[in-house]
Amino acid sequence: MQLAMIQDAVMPLEDLPAPYLDRGMFFGDGVYEVLRSYEGKLFALDPHMQRFEESLEAIDIRGIDLDRVRRHVIDAYAQSGISEAKVYFHATRGQSARDMTDTPGLKPSFFMTVTELEDYSQEKDQGIPVWSHPDWRWKKCHIKSLNLLANVMARRDAHRRGGREAILFDEAKGLITEGAGSSFFALLLDVGGCLTLRTSPLIANILPSVTRTYVLRAADNIGLSVVEESVSCADAIQAQELFIAMTTHDIVPVVRFAETPIGDGKPGLVTQQLMSEFRKFVG
């Protein structure tokens, strides 16, 4: 008899609930998206759906009706009645016995949650500490894959040290890539003494963040020069200002990098300008 066990319960394999035989659980064989709402309105649904489609194509998951996913997102959010919500959804290659090769005729699995966002106002008002961590992720970070073990390990390490986010760096080059769940930005003086916004260019080891796109638009709107070039941890601790950006929090000031205060240890004026400008996109 083929058997399965969940916690302490043993059962015939054929009685195992189908989600336990999902390729997402066995291999992380799937992709996901996260978007949010502001004051009862979903934000940036189109670019999130575009990135979801690109991730599906990148790992060759077929059979997902993207228009249907869009309707599911809109309908589920409307049913939730939550003003400030986080919408998470993922698709996996499907459910089958554990085998790395494809099973013919697999039907993709879809899962979604709509939950209330935490109140991040204190973090945004006061700023957060961050810690650096080696970037142990795979080489295809532009795919929003379910394989997030390296991200989890990095953020757990940062939390143990008192940080709110882990800032990942390439061990070979010493350059910052991005946060465990965020994009990373530094405000630095260039050789002419002008303040510039620095962030990593979008290459294969960087997730093409939707929020990042809006941050760069906000920077352009306030006349801030942007340079898409990675910085080192040593550059970061010398920065005038630092901040991170992610879907659920948008822009969050960074006031301490490891043990080093950034600036005067308070959210910087330019970061606050960018936060105000970002809010115009969601009004």
Image (spheres, rainbow, N blue to C red):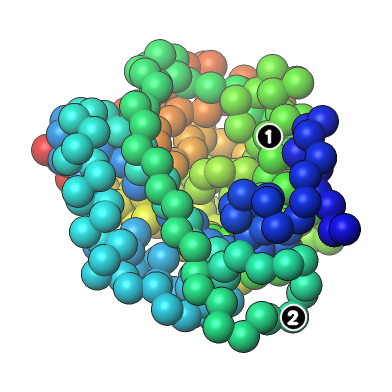
Residue under the point 73% across and 67% down:
97
Residue 141 - label: none
The residue drawn where x is 30% and y is 62% is: 69
Instruction: List the single residue furthest toward the front.
Output: 1
For the N terminus, the quadrant is bottom right
Secondary structure of the residue carrying tag 2 is loop
Q: Quadrant of residue 256?
A: top right
Residue at disc 1, secondary structure: helix
Residue 78 in the image, given as x and y percentages of width and height = 17, 40
Packing grade of label 1 (10 A; few <14, some 14-19, many >=20) is many
Query: Compared to 231, does 252 lie above or below?
Result: above
**Residue occupied by mark 1:** 155
Q: What is the spatial separation of the Cα atoms under label 1 and label 2, in whole angstroms?
A: 32 Å
The residue positioned farthest toward the right in the image shown: 1
Give the amino acid at mark 2: Thr
Q: Which amino acid, mark 1?
A: Arg
281 vs 269, left or right, is left
Query: Taking 150 as reference, is 54 above or below it?
Result: below
Q: Residue at image x 66%, y 63%?
A: 23
In the rendered picture of this protein, how many numbered marks are placed on residues? Answer: 2
Q: Position of residue 277 (x, y in %)?
A: 21, 39
For disc 2, the marked residue is: 101
| Mark 1 vs 2: CB contact within 8 A | no
The quadrant where residue 165 appears:
top right
Q: Nearer the viewer, residue 121 or 81?
A: 81
Residue 29 picture location, percent across and down: 64, 65
Residue 212 horizontal side relative to residue 7, left or right: left
Residue 13 appears in view: yes
Residue 206: percent from the left, percent from the top? 57, 61
